[in-house]
Amino acid sequence: MVKKINPDNFYDPPGSWVNAVELDGSERLLVTSGVVGITPEGQVVEDPIEQINQAWRNVGRMLESADMTPHDLVKMTVYFTSTDYIAESRVARESMLGEARCAMTGLVVALVDPALVIEIDVFAAKKS
């Protein structure tokens, strides 16, 4: 079972996520490598905003490939190369997630490929 937790004695998350997720061990797990803004044809999307949108579409595709939905997300870590991209990513994330919530962390970092502006790690779980 997947239980999403926002404890009464803890602050409410200031965004569209939960503070914690508890798993009881009976789930199928999906753990991704970093999901980036590359098209299905293998091309890096050059426009940063379109690249962000592509990365979030790719997260959705990864979930679909495992017969999962955004409601099965447990934890996401989003890596940005600049704070300039956070607001646009939030819009794209909300579009992909809908009402689904999971634990989430965002970081500003240097990515290995300088053409990339965002990378998203996903951990999802679904009852077997």
Image: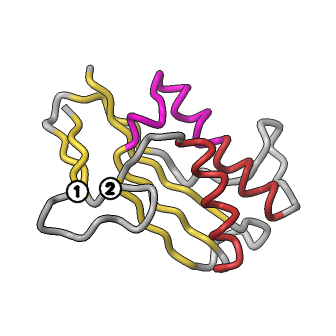
**Residue 30 occupies which quadrant of the picture?**
top left
Secondary element type, mark 2 = loop
**Residue that appears at 47% across and 37% down:** 70
Asked if disc 1 and disc 2 are in contact, CB closer than 8 Å, the reply is: yes
User: Residue 38: image x %, image y %?
Assistant: 76, 49
Verify whether residue 106 appears in magenta.
no
The disc placed on residue 18 is: 2
For label 1, the residue is 6
User: Residue 75: image x %, image y %?
Assistant: 37, 52
Q: Nearer the viewer, residue 82 or 43?
A: 82
Numbered disc total: 2
Secondary element type, mark 1 = loop
User: Residue 74: image x %, image y %?
Assistant: 34, 46
Q: Vertically, is 97 above or below 80?
A: above
Q: CA distance from mark 1 to mark 2?
A: 6 Å
Count neighbours of disc 1 (C-alpha within 10 A) and say few if under 14, some if 14 to 19, many if 20 or more: some
The answer to whether 89 appears left or right of 128 in the picture is right
Tell me the amino acid under the disc marked 1: Asn
Verify whether residue 65 appears in magenta.
yes
Tell me the amino acid under the disc marked 2: Val
Q: Nearer the viewer, residue 83 or 58?
A: 83
In the picture, which quadrant includes the C terminus? Answer: top left
**Residue that appears at 51% across and 50% down:** 33
Q: Find the magenta span and give its range.
A: 58-73
Say how the picture is coloured. Answer: secondary structure
